[in-house]
Amino acid sequence: MKKLFTLFLALTASMSLFAQWRLGVNGGGSWNHYSINKQYMTDYRFVDEWGGAAGVMTQYNFFDWLGLRAELNFAQRSYRHTRYEFADNLSVRYENNYLLLPVTVNFSFGGQKVRGFVNAGVYMPACG
């Protein structure tokens, strides 16, 4: 009986701990535009390109109104540039991939029907 009670307490404690964790995924696309001062580069042409984004998010709630969130995101920021020199055209595609790790504090407010939140924090690129 003592072992059964200990097992019940362990399961109850783990369920209440598990209820405080959130896990999610995100994904999407971006239209990337490269901007540069082309004062002396009149033979350059920059072309916008599509990029992708995907990530995994986890959040731990300390209270109903306060949580800590971390996301691991992969983002593409690509563009193409062409240089017209005499008869030869040099076209290069740059694919910039970034791994981002934003860490934020999540403040939640409101009632049961309508609830809002504010995320505040910092992030830094892990690689580029």
Image (tube, rainbow, N blue to C red):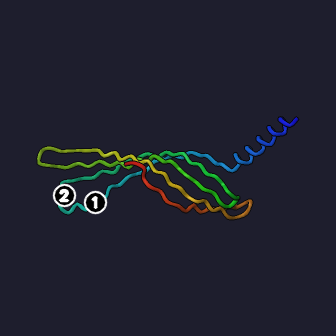
Give percent across and percent down for residue 118.
59, 63
Secondary structure of the residue carrying tag 1 is loop
Secondary structure of the residue carrying tag 2 is loop
Q: Amino acid at mark 2?
A: Met
> At 49% from the left edge and 45% from the top edge, which residue is drawn?
54
Q: Dot 2 surroundings within 10 Å: few (below 14), some, or many (20 or more)?
A: few
| Cβ atoms under marks 1 and 2 closer than 8 Å | yes
* Residue on which disc 1 sits: 36
Q: Nearer the viewer, residue 42 or 96?
A: 96
**Would residue 21 appear left or right of 28 to someone viewing this image?**
right
* Circle number at residue 123: none
Give percent across and percent down for residue 11.
77, 40
**Would residue 20 appear left or right of 76 to someone viewing this image?**
right
> At 25% from the left edge and 62% from the top edge, which residue is drawn?
37
Give percent across and percent down for residue 88.
14, 44
The Cα–Cα distance between marks 1 and 2, rounded to whole angstroms, is 10 Å
Name the N-terminal-most of marks 1 and 2. Answer: 1
Q: Image height check: is 31 above or below 9? A: below
Q: Nearer the viewer, residue 46 or 116?
A: 116
Q: Amino acid at mark 1?
A: Ile
Q: Quadrant of residue 92?
A: top left
- Considering the image in quadrants, where does the N terminus appear? top right
* Residue on which disc 2 sits: 41
> At 67% from the left edge and 56% from the top edge, which residue is drawn?
62
Q: Nearer the viewer, residue 111 or 30?
A: 111
Give percent across and percent down for residue 6.
81, 39
